[in-house]
Image (cartoon, helix red, strand yellow):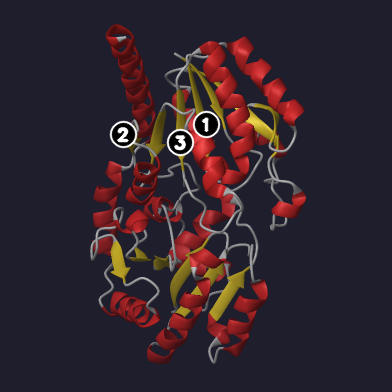
Amino acid sequence: MKISFLSAFPPYRGGISRHSSQIYKYLIKRYQVQAINFKKLYPNFLFPGKSQYSLDLGDAIGARVLSSINIWSWRKTLNVIYDYKPDIIIFKFWHPFFCPCYKYIIKRVRNRLDCPVIMVCDNIYPHEWFPLSSFMINGLVSHVDAFIIQSSAVEKELLGLLDKPIYNKVFHPIYNDYPKSIDAQVAKKKIGILEGFKVVLFFGIIRNYKGLDLLIKSMEKVFLKDNNIMLVIAGECYSDKDKYVALIQKSNYKNRILWIEEFIKEEEVSVYFSAADVVVLPYRSASQSGVIPLSYNYNKPVIVPDLDGLVEVVEDNKTGLIYSLNDVDDLTLKILDFFKNYNAKFYKQNIIQYKKNFSWENFSNSIQNLYNLIVERRKNKNINS
């Protein structure tokens, strides 16, 4: 089977690129795959970070022909796909900003080549307001044959959008190609944690919906009760940096908050997770999160709010703890309870067993299953007509 796969791949950095590159690596073990990458992902005025790229530009995957804002590149992308003559088109969707270019390409390829189209959904609707989101998303999904979703939260969005869509729900697989864990004390020393301190880790790009301010407020109460805990924030801020700086400066325990305000390079990820005792995701909203499988890769427990997209991949009191959404006091209680009853070996054993459910093989199998289902439905439709 020949597959054309449209997404952001390296040298773009971040979770979308990372996830797409892993899907690609597993697909090429079984199929012929044409990766189509962006040459322009976001215009600069829409990108709040320091850089859209990883430092190593030599790791690019696929032909970088598509620009999200240049219709001439959309036509060039069409020709690249037409020449390849795929049996199926797969594209990664995470934000309505990309609806116009995706719709332009998908609609024409589907009509000309009559090949099935599968949309791999990180979200359907964005976490933060974006103009004309619903209008653009509705216009795009009408040209899609099937969907891969990764959480119940996105499943609900899909079922609210379409009547009887074809889809598979496959949880975000575990990343298993990051650098290996290192000794916890060595890791803590590397990032400046004093000996004997326990570490609460917040990891990833910082946006308002991720609730870092809630965690900082919670940790103020945690610090009051436990003198041997530090909060490590590892991630670049994409919104309201002054708000978080003010909260930290206002804290009576600001010397126990360490913020590495930069995008964490892949070769450094293991240092932060090796240093962590627990990873906290204080999100206000979430469809799913790549931080949980990354934590599980390092056998680290997580503390998450009771959001559908998170709790379905956390076994309460086994692979982590669950607190009431937006409840700072309950989050404080869960963090204190975690350390009061802390048993690293117990959590590690549970996570090792639990993460077997999240494989890249399952993810790639779902593509073949959906393709077979689409083809079968088309045959039945032709017979009945």
Which residue has dot 2 on it? 164
When the figure is inspected, residue 154 is found, relative to residue 83, above or below; the finding is below
Q: Residue at x 50, y 55 (%)?
A: 270
Residue type at the position of mark 2: Lys
Q: CA distance from mark 2 to mark 1?
A: 21 Å
Q: Residue at x 47, y 45 (%)?
A: 124
The image quarter in which residue 208 lies? bottom right
Viewer-closest of 333 and 376: 376
> Few, some or many C-alpha atoms within 10 Å of disc 1 (few <14, some 14-19, many ≥20)?
many
Q: CA distance from mark 1 to mark 3?
A: 6 Å
Q: Earlier in the sequence, mark 3 or mark 2?
A: 3
Q: Quadrant of the C terminus?
A: top left
Which residue has dot 1 on it? 91
Viewer-closest of 349 and 91: 91
The circle on residue 118 is: none
Give the image location of residue 88, x and y in percent. Answer: 47, 19
Viewer-closest of 134 and 223: 134
Q: CA distance from mark 3 to mark 2?
A: 17 Å
Give the image location of residue 17, x and y in percent. Answer: 57, 41
When the figure is inspected, residue 201 is found, relative to residue 228, above or below; the finding is above
Residue type at the position of mark 1: Phe
Give the image location of residue 94, x and y in percent. Answer: 53, 44
Find out whether the residues at labels 1 and 3 contact each other: C-beta distance under 8 Å: yes
> Few, some or many C-alpha atoms within 10 Å of disc 3 (few <14, some 14-19, many ≥20)?
many
Which residue has dot 3 on it? 120
Q: Residue at x 67, y 16 (%)?
A: 79
> Few, some or many C-alpha atoms within 10 Å of disc 2 (few <14, some 14-19, many ≥20)?
few
Q: Nearer the viewer, mark 3 or mark 2?
A: 2
**Is residue 249 visible in the rendered structure shown here?**
yes
